[in-house]
Image: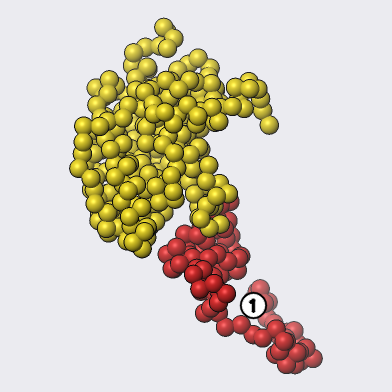
């Protein structure tokens, strides 16, 4: 974007599919404003009946973790197996854990 | 027309072909943008509209073939009729011009199509009303897409505004044909198109206003595509669109 200031900003597209519960990231589009972004997302990503709901978010507005900081962000959880709820005996009434 | 066709059926066939041909010819024009759109997203958006229009034409040709009762298929109606047999409104066959011209033509025609589908949903012919109902959902989106761009470009930069005004000046006279009288107006084939003028105008005017475009005054010019009298642009369009079926009749792939 910074290389050409006349380019439209980038928007990330999230689609909730017919059977899905969550919106899933499926790609990105360029658009001048939110309404154009939504239409472009519809036209580019829902041509084959993929979705029942679309979200678009300015890519600029997403705060992402630093790929170079992966070890300190995620490794410490590796050996803390006790954080998984697998050490408890669940009553039968509790399903889908 | 086959002698066995009743006058009533001829009028019905004529009515359906007008709508089918307009959708096909505009769909073909829009398909010419494929790979040439201003940005990839818009390229896909316009191609989607083209495909929807061609899909509407297919349903209508199948229906027309059934009315005619001579066993002509969708392909035969689309690719084996001559220019004077096409009943599309002339505006559909005009060359694309720049993107603004294409979008404005879409807006003017699709807003008319929306009036048409809305009325035809009430058709006593179940098959016809089903086609109208399905097409209306598509057309609502098409009109929204075109309106957004008409406003964006009309109320845009000095250059885009000037181009859109030029496009409107060029296209507006062709919209008179939507509502002009024709021989099948007083038959049971469907509502006379003149009935849609006020609804169309009150849908179109606010968008053009927001787009800061001036609607030209009506002149005596009326095009006659509905009667099979086409502009000089129709011959090369058909030559390209029909080439394959003409060169290799009944070819399939």
Q: Is residue A71 visible?
A: yes
Among the 4 quarters of the image, the one containing residue B88:
top left
Q: Residue at x 24, y 51 (%)?
A: B214
Q: Is residue A20 above or below residue B173?
A: below
* Residue in the foreground of this view, choosing between A31 and B187: A31
The letter of the red chain is: A
Instruction: Report the side of B165 relative to B142 (left or right).
Output: left
Q: Quadrant of the C terminus of chain B?
A: top right
Instruction: Report the side of B149 relative to B48 (left or right).
Output: left
Chain letter, disc 1 residue: A
Which residue is label 1 attached to?
Answer: A94
Q: Is residue B127 visible?
A: no
Image coordinates of residue A91 in percent, x first then y, are 68, 81
Image coordinates of residue B29 in percent, x first then y, are 48, 39
Q: Residue at x 52, y 61 (%)?
A: A41
Q: Is residue B128 above or below residue B102?
A: above
Among the 4 quarters of the image, the one containing residue B182:
top left
Q: Colour of chain B?
A: yellow
């Amino acid at each position: 974007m910074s290389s050409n200031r006349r380019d439209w900003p980038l928007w990330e597209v999230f689609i909730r599919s017919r059977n899905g519960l969550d919106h899933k990231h499926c790609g990105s589009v360029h658009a001048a404003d939110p309404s154009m972004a939504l239409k472009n997302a519809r036209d580019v990503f829902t041509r084959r009946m993929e979705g029942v709901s679309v979200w678009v978010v300015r890519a600029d507005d997403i705060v992402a973790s630093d790929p170079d900081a992966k070890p300190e962000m995620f490794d410490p959880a590796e050996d803390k197996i006790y954080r998984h709820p697998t050490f408890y005996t669940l009553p039968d009434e509790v399903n889908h854990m | 027309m086959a002698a066995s066709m009743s006058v009533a059926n001829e009028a019905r066939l004529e009515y359906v072909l007008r709508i089918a041909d307009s959708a096909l010819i505009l769909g073909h024009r829009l398909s010419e943008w494929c790979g040439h759109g201003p940005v990839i997203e818009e390229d896909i958006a316009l191609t989607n509209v083209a495909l929807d229009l061609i899909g509407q034409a297919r349903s209508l040709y199948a229906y027309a073939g059934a009315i005619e009762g001579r066993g002509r298929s969708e392909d035969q109606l689309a690719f084996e009729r001559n220019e004077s047999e096409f009943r599309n409104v002339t505006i559909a066959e005009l060359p694309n011009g720049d993107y603004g011209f294409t979008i404005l033509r879409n807006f003017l025609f699709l807003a008319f199509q929306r009036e048409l589908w809305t009325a035809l949903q009430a058709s006593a012919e179940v098959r016809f009303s089903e086609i109208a109902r399905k097409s209306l959902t598509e057309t609502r989106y098409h009109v929204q897409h075109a309106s957004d761009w008409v406003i964006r470009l009309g109320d845009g930069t000095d250059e885009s505004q000037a181009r859109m005004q030029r496009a409107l000046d060029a296209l507006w006279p062709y919209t008179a044909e939507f509502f002009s009288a024709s021989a099948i107006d007083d038959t049971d084939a469907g509502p006379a198109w003149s009935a849609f003028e006020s609804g169309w105008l009150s849908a179109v005017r606010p968008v053009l206003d927001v787009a800061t475009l001036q609607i030209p005054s009506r002149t005596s010019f009326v095009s006659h595509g509905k009667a099979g009298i086409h502009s000089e642009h129709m011959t090369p369009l058909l030559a390209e669109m029909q080439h394959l079926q003409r060169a290799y009749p009944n070819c399939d792939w």
